[in-house]
Amino acid sequence: MRVFAGLVGFGLLAPLIVYPVFLMKVLCFALFASAFNLLIGYVGLLSFGHAMFFGFAAYVAGHLAKVGTVSLPYWLPLLGWKWLVIAIPPLTPELAILGGTLVAALLGLIVGAIAIRRQGIYFAMVTLALAQMVFFFCVQAKFTGGEDGIQAIPRRPMLGVLDVGNDLTFYYVVLAIFCAGFLIIYRTVHSPFGQVLKAIRENEARAISLGYAVSRFKLIAFVISAALAGLAGATKAMVFQLASLTDVTWQMSGEVVLMTLVGGMGTVFGPAVGAAIIIYMQNYLAGFGEWVLVIQGAIFVVAVLVFRRGIVGELVALLRQRAAKAGGPQETIGLAKPAR
Amino acid sequence: MRRNLTAAAAAAALCMGAGSALAQYSDGIIKLGVMNDQSGTYSDLSGQGSVWAAKKAIEDFCKANKCHDKIEVVFADHQNKPDVGSNIVRQWFDVDKVDAVVDVPTSSVALAVNTITKEKNKVFLVSGAAASNLTGKDCSPNTIHWTYDTWALANGTGQAIVKTGGDSWFFLTADYAFGHALERDTEAVVVKNGGKVLGKVRHPFPAQDFSSFLLQAQASKAKIIGLANAGADTTNAIKQAAEFGIVSGGQNLAGLLVFITDVHALGLKTAQGLIFTEAWYWDANDANRAFAKEFGAANRGNMPTMVQAGVYSAVLHYLKAVHELKSDADGAAVVAKMKAMPTDDKLFGKGSIRQDGRKIHDMYLFEVKKPEESKGPWDYYKTRATIPAEQAFRPLNEGECPLVK
Amino acid sequence: MFELIGVPPQALFGQLLLGLINGAFYALLSLGLAVIFGLMNVINFTHGAQYMMGAFGAWMLLSYLGIPYWGALILAPIIVGLFGVLIERLFISRLYHLDHLYGLLLTFGLALIVEGLFRREYGISGLPYSNPIPGGTNLGFMFLPWYRGWVVVFSLTVCLATWFVIEKTQLGAYLRAATERPDLVQAFGINVPRMITLTYGFGVGLAALAGVLAAPIYSVNPVMGANLIIVVFAVVVIGGMGSIMGSIITGFGLGVIEGLTKVFYPEASNTVIFIIMAIVLMLRPQGLFGTPK
């Protein structure tokens, strides 16, 4: 908790030194990575399609903020396809973000119900393929604007009072959103629910034999993870006033995996640290084009071969080693070893 | 984004002229940002070549006029992604004191930059992007659309082809907004000129295999198969059309967005007979050839595309306007000045800029030569028709631009 | 019946034949993946990049050494296969004792490196590679280029030959046994690590072979494998991740289904494979030909 307070303090003062828009980007991706980490670090499920929640929520939030009116297709026998039009005026940022988050949660429920049936690599492949479906849907659907994306998303005053058109003001709002999301993850993990998740990760068969409805736990965790990834995506859309196809590609899914891996899977602050590092690197090396790809690939390789616990993971392991000498509890960091 | 390259500073230093009133440039410097694709699909037609063209324009301007202040060029890679592009431009305007953004291929990025430039009252000189909305619904007092747009391409290619005998069409369209727009614009032109559209098929974007769509095109027996797509989709479709013997079977392919770099990538054997519209060709006259020779020496032997030539022309005119105004701080004012002055440069000749931000010049309908007809590397085109400037672009009143009263 | 659907039979047969040709690529690529996964339990995300390397290999052999297509058909897979062997020895073998997901992440990283390097060197516009057997024949309902016909015949032969070797020969038996109980098989004196390395090299070689086949018809560019790989994953999952015959049949089958979709509802042709995958996973999670775990 002290670490968290320290980080928040740093966050409050940071815009004095660093460009606020860059900081907001880091915060959004830190939340995205932390949401992803909930699944991989604490439940042991590698979702290779998490960008679908991130990106789709961005689209929904963008649409709600710019246009408002929602048209849903439905099918009737004999009459064919019809449209249900819900006329809403363009929404303020907080409602748009909320809308995006809820849609992401719903998508998470659907995808989770299909994907949870499998584990390990199969789960990863399923999420990847479903994310591709969402990608192709986004390419075609009218409201996403295809290759153009949703542009010029307005930033209306929030709660009627806050002028978030100003980058600095909006930064503090985003910081607040990040802290809220982060706290949700923290409470989820450090709770009886979180304990059961860890038990499932360590030995699923035993958890089942103890009477836990394992599938339901996994699904709930999946939905929370999806919703928070959606929150991150919707916020990002408001920050950059743009929602585009990049946010739903599988390369984006790969990036969040990289951030979490570098930072430390299964640690509390790891993903946020990883996100900060990767975003900074991308920014710094943006002039080098494809070298960014090569470097990211190299980081992946190095991280997997020798650095599996990630930066924060290594730090925590170091601290635990000292605690272990004094006699304290041990915990697994990273992916669980396969039970033979 | 701290990717600075102070190259033209040297040229400017050459002309630190004494005398005459010193202009008040914002932050004491005129800073141009060339943003385009440096590593992806469009890197060959824009990329570092555009940066070279911008610097060349500064060099030529400073040779002809006395340059009083520092003029600097920075560049960045937007990777064809609107979020990357808008990020860079935001940082350029907020932190790096850039005054004008130049080039920006890929319409989605250009539209994003268009919005931000208007918000921050800077200048946006579009050379690479195609979206005709930039001078239509999305027109802005801070943006000038320089080289070409989808309407000009559709009109040029569609009209000229129908008039030269290609009156039955079949469309192969990329199934996303840009492809639909190209198809819609071209179909309108074809029908208006007495042609018929025999059918159309939408292919997913992006697509690898066009065999089944080409089969349908072949079966339609249309004289012209219009490719309403771009980049890899176009080159793939053309390659596979060659495989299925479409051109040798008597049908012609009409590329709706093709650059000389695409033809170079395909090779003449595959691309021969392709018909499309462009704004500029390196081998058209001596001035172009001279420019191309210098370009080739600095760019690995590649010839400049119309986009890179457009960057040269736009930057030159921008500098003239800023020089006259003696200020670069108010973007809208600079653009208004650019519209007030007629354009004249060695590559595009004389031209003008309309109220809606559209630069006017002749467009050309080209056909790709057969391998036997080509006398050397990059000798690819023969001119099929010239479309005069007044007819080449969408009429002012049809664009729905709020700036046009 | 066809009049009701509104499609003339010739168009339908034409599309089916084309679908079969596409299916040949899917089958060949998913075969390599299935071999690697079935025998090594490693998801080879680098497969798309290795496919691309095969195509580039053919191009480089032609441009720098003047070796034509037919030579490249043999040489490129061997060269890329050796590269695969190198990767396996240096990197992948260190991960066998860990969760399989790390193998996925490692090969993902390798794919990024390979793609990035090729993009750096060759840009993204694509390089020309001429058709070794131009021309074709008019079958009445469509014009079939000779080359595409060759692709189907050749892939089918390679697929069946691979299946035969793995399922019906002694070498194949050793390979399959080595996956089940490596310690026991090693006790019999068989060099298990070497077999595994060669298996990986072989799977990679298959990917490269598909790449050489693709070079004359698709654009030879560094991203040609990136989007294809996801589709191939779906094929392997549908077929059953360890089943060799499953991926062959599914590969060809999905090519045909995709071809049909292009006739009736072309906009969905990219998504139909994933929809099928989702359905198969809901009804039969181990895949159509897989063994239930």
Image (cartoon, coloured by chain):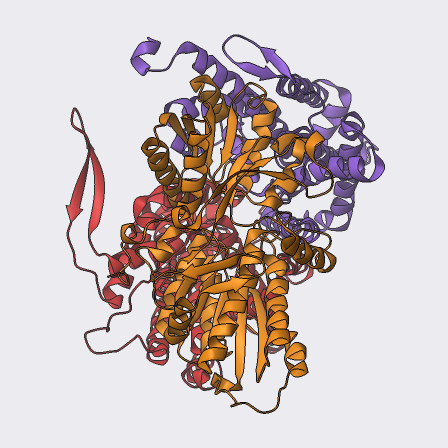
Chain colours: A red, B orange, C purple
Q: Locate residue C175, reporting x and y percent.
A: 73, 29
Residue A215 versus residue B249: which sits nearer the camera? B249
Answer above or below: position of A172 versus A90. Answer: below
Q: Quadrant of residue B20?
A: bottom right
Residue A325 in the figure: left or right of residue C84: left
Can residue A313 be seen by looking at this rendering? no
Q: Locate residue C156, reporting x and y percent.
A: 64, 18
Quarter containing the N terminus of chain C:
top left
Q: Quadrant of residue A130?
A: top left
Residue B155 versus residue A29: which sits nearer the camera? B155
Can residue B352 be seen by looking at this rendering? yes
Residue B144 versus residue C220: which sits nearer the camera? B144
Q: Residue at x 61, y 11 (%)?
A: C137
Q: Quadrant of residue A95?
A: bottom left
Q: Locate residue A302, reporting x and y percent.
A: 68, 60
Tally of numbered discs: 0
Answer above or below: position of C60 versus C142. Answer: below
Residue A16 versus residue A330: which sits nearer the camera? A16
Q: Locate residue B199, reporting x and y percent.
A: 37, 25
Answer above or below: position of B241 versus A176. Answer: above
Q: Residue at x 63, y 54 (%)?
A: B288
Residue B78 in the figure: left or right of residue A308: left
